[in-house]
Amino acid sequence: NVDFAGRIVLNDKGVEVFNFGKHKGKSVLEVLEKEPGYYGWMMDGEFPLNTKQMLTKIKLKAFNG
């Protein structure tokens, strides 16, 4: 698990993927690129703080490359 709740996990290639909902199994970065509003939806949602922190960390890592 990438986050404590297991909402984000690593796939067999070591890539962070969502482990729930309509984007289950999809790369976090791929989803955020194609559907930028998903980040805001998760940040406004009832997700644990750690999940939100890990999501932000993944997003910032991509932009700071």
Image: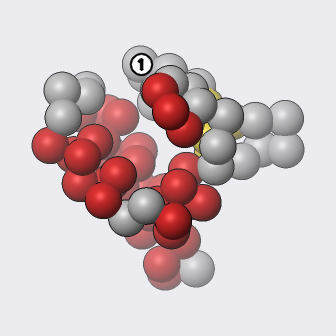
Q: Quadrant of the N terminus?
A: top right
Compared with residue 44, is residue 39 higher up or lower down, i.e. above or below? below
Q: Quadrant of the C terminus?
A: bottom right
Residue at x-position 40% and y-position 48%? 55
Query: Left or right: where does residue 36 sit relative to residue 47?
Result: right
Disc 1 designates what residue? 5
Which residue occupies the foreground of this view, 46 or 38?
Answer: 38
Which residue occupies the foreground of this view, 17 or 41?
Answer: 41
Residue at x-position 30% and y-position 59%? 37
Query: Left or right: where does residue 22 sit relative to residue 39?
Result: right
Compared with residue 11, is residue 40 higher up or lower down, i.e. above or below? below
Residue at x-position 35% and y-position 52%? 38
Residue at x-position 37% and y-position 64%? 36
Check disc 1 and give the amino acid type. Ala
- The x and y percentages for residue 2 are 54, 34
Element marked by disc 1? loop
| Label 1 Cα neighbours within 10 Å, binned few <14 / some 14-19 / many ≥20 | some
Image quadrant in which you'd find residue 42 = top left
- The x and y percentages for residue 58 are 49, 57
Residue found farthest to the top = 5
On the question of residue 8 being in view, the answer is no
- The x and y percentages for residue 47 are 25, 28
Residue found farthest to the front = 22
- The x and y percentages for residue 49 are 23, 33
Image quadrant in which you'd find residue 19 = top right
On the question of residue 32 being in view, the answer is yes
